[in-house]
Image (spheres, rainbow, N blue to C red):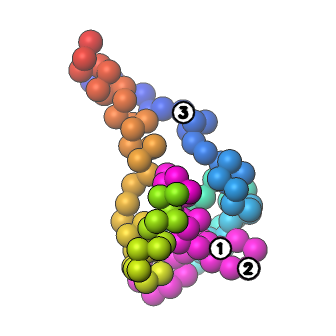
Amino acid sequence: RDYTFPDGAQMKSLEDLGIPAPIYHFAFGEKRIYNEYCPTLTRSTGGGHIPSVLNRQLTPYECGLLMGLTPKESERLCASGLSKTRLYNCLGNSIVVDILVMLFKPIVKSEVE
């Protein structure tokens, strides 16, 4: 079947989420700068994989917002008692729910028609 990927304009920007820009991320030996959106969060070992902003790493709370959690859900996750490392791992193993819905909506719609 034909499939057209949705336009990314529906994504929330860093400004929408209240996260300062730019975000710095070291990938493949080079420093990359993101001004409007965050790079993919990944579960990785060895450090250096958590994006940073204003000379600090993004917090698990901020990463939760980037992954599509509401502020309340992100607060609950951070208050769960899991270590920061475990929180980063869980968030890096996840997928942004809003993106998943955006990708599957045209497929489900075509199945119903």
Tag 2 secondary structure:
loop
Q: Horizontal and vertical percent for residue 66?
A: 55, 57
Instruction: Confirm whether residue 111 shows in the render.
Output: yes
Residue corresponding to mark 2: 55
- The answer to whether the residues at label 2 and label 1 have Cβ atoms under 8 Å apart is yes
* Amino acid type, residue under disc 3 in the picture: Asp
Residue corresponding to mark 3: 7
Instruction: Confirm whether residue 43 shows in the render.
Output: no
Residue corresponding to mark 1: 52
Q: Horizontal and vertical percent for residue 20?
A: 74, 62
Mark 3, mark 2: which one is toward the viewer?
2
Write down the region rendered in magenta.
44-71
Q: Nearer the viewer, residue 72 or 100?
A: 72
Q: Residue at x 68, y 48 (%)?
A: 16
Q: Residue at x 50, y 85 (%)?
A: 47
Residues at marks 2 and 1, CA–CA distance in whole angstroms? 6 Å
Q: Nearer the viewer, residue 73 or 23?
A: 73
- The answer to whether the residues at label 3 and label 2 have Cβ atoms under 8 Å apart is no
Magenta stretch contains residue 52: yes
* Amino acid type, residue under disc 1 in the picture: Ser
Tag 1 secondary structure:
strand
- The answer to whether the residues at label 1 and label 3 have Cβ atoms under 8 Å apart is no
Q: Nearer the viewer, residue 16 or 95?
A: 16
Q: Residue at x 44, y 51 (%)?
A: 96
